[in-house]
Structure formats: C-alpha cells, structure tokens
Amino acid sequence: MIHQLTGTLAGRGETFAVVSCGGVGYKVFAGGKTLAGLPMTGAEVTLYTHLAVKEDALDLYGFPDEQSLKLFDLLISVSGVGPKTALGILDLDTVPNIQAAILERRTDLLARASGIGKRTAERIVLELQSRVALVGAMERTKSMDVNLEVEEALVMLGYQRAEARHAIEQLGSADPDGAVGAGGTTTEARLKEALKMLGRK
C-alpha cells in the first residue's frame, strides 16, 4: 500500500525514524544499519517501506533500497519469522551476503541474528533457497566467515559487538569477486585495520 516515503527526517528513536511528508509524521521502524545510515534531522530522506497489518496496529518498516525490502518480504514469508526478526537478519550483513548464506545452507551464519534459533534458520534455508538467485555465493560466505572471526576477536578484546560490526563494515568489501577494501581479505589483516579504526574514536 505504501511502497516508498520521501520527506524530511523529523526525528529518530532506537528502533524507528519519523519521516514528515505533507504535514504528516510517519513512524517507520527500521534496523540498526538503516537507522545509522540516515542523514541528520531536517534533511530529506527516502525509505522503501512495508506496511504490516495487524489486528491492533498498522506498522511501517523502512529500508534504504528496494533490494533490502525484497529480502525482508521474503524473510517474513517464512513461518515463524516476524518483521522484527527479519530486521535482525538484515542487520547481520549486506543483502547479497545474506542471500549467499541462504543458498549455501549456512544456518550458523543466519542463527547469529537475535530471535533466530537453529530450527528457524533451517526453515529459512528450506523455504527460500529456491527463491534466491546469486552468483558467487560460496565466495561470499567465505568472506562472512572472515568477518565473523574478526568480530569475535574484537569482542574478546573488550569491544561491544555493535561497534565491532560497524568497524568491519567501514573496512569495505572482502569479497574475492568484488572491490577489496582497505582491510584486505585475511582475518589478520582485517583485524589489524579494524583495531586501527576503533583506535581513532
């Protein structure tokens, strides 16, 4: 019903943003990555949206691009996966990398999301594997393994998981088929660069 909102960012909370369009402020729930990527309050913003209809509420969920929205729609079509759980999965990594985890049956990677157990991850793989298309899935899951090793190392060193993930994202791609970022492709190289980035804060 509401596919896209373009308006002024009027404010934000821990789990939502308020977008003002034509004098109406829309409360749009979003994942942490989406919220972190929003501009400053007062700036123009565009979000692609999904309207979740419940007996007692109409909830809008927002995404920075149609690719994220499409994956969200696929995820919530799986039994036992609600909108908040789907947002948690989208916060794990990029859309292509999450698709790769599904194609490669990497339930361990999907189960890292809050609210996702082994059975739910297996159900996601079973129901969506034939509905996702992606080239180079195996290489992408290898990249995810490297980033996970770096993340766990940073957590062991005392960093919060959220700031560890943010630092890894800032390093750029480690995908063999994509542009390699400043962090390189090995665990050691990316850990070293992540520590440098965290040290600048």
Image (cartoon, grey):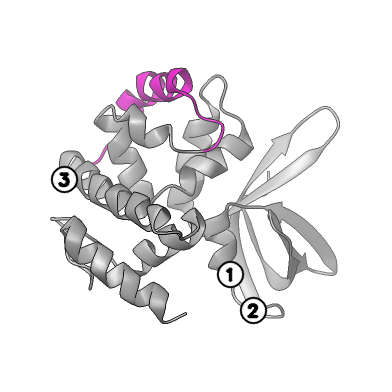
Name the residue type under label 3: Glu
Residue ID at (62%, 71%): 45
Pointer 2 or 3: first along the chain: 2
Circle 1 SS class: loop
Please give the label number shown on residue 139: 3
Q: Element type at marker 2?
A: loop
21, 141: nearer the viewer: 141
> In which quadrant will I find the N terminus?
top right
Q: Main secondary structure of the magenta part?
A: helix
Q: Is residue 43 magenta?
A: no
The amino acid type of the residue labelled 2 equals: Met
Asked if the stretch drawn in magenta spans residue 120, the answer is yes
For disc 1, the neighbor class at 10 Å (few under 14, some 14 to 19, many from 20) is some
Residue 81 falls in which quadrant of the image?
top right
From the viewer's perspective, is 169 left or right of 68?
left
Specify the quadrant of the image occupied by residue 80.
top right
Question: Relative to 185, does residue 141 appear above or below in the rendering?
Answer: above
The answer to whether residue 117 is left or right of residue 136 is right
Secondary structure, mark 3, is helix
Question: For the residue marked with disc 1, what is the amino acid?
Answer: Leu
Q: Which residue is mark 2?
A: 40
- Please provide the residue range marked out in magenta: 114-135
Residue name at image x 47 percent, y 49 percent = 68
Side of 187 relative to 85 (left or right): left
* Disc marking residue 38: 1
Q: Nearer the viewer, residue 198 or 99?
A: 198
- Expressed as whole percent of the image width and height from the top left, the position of residue 166 reads 44, 63
Q: Can you see residue 29?
A: yes
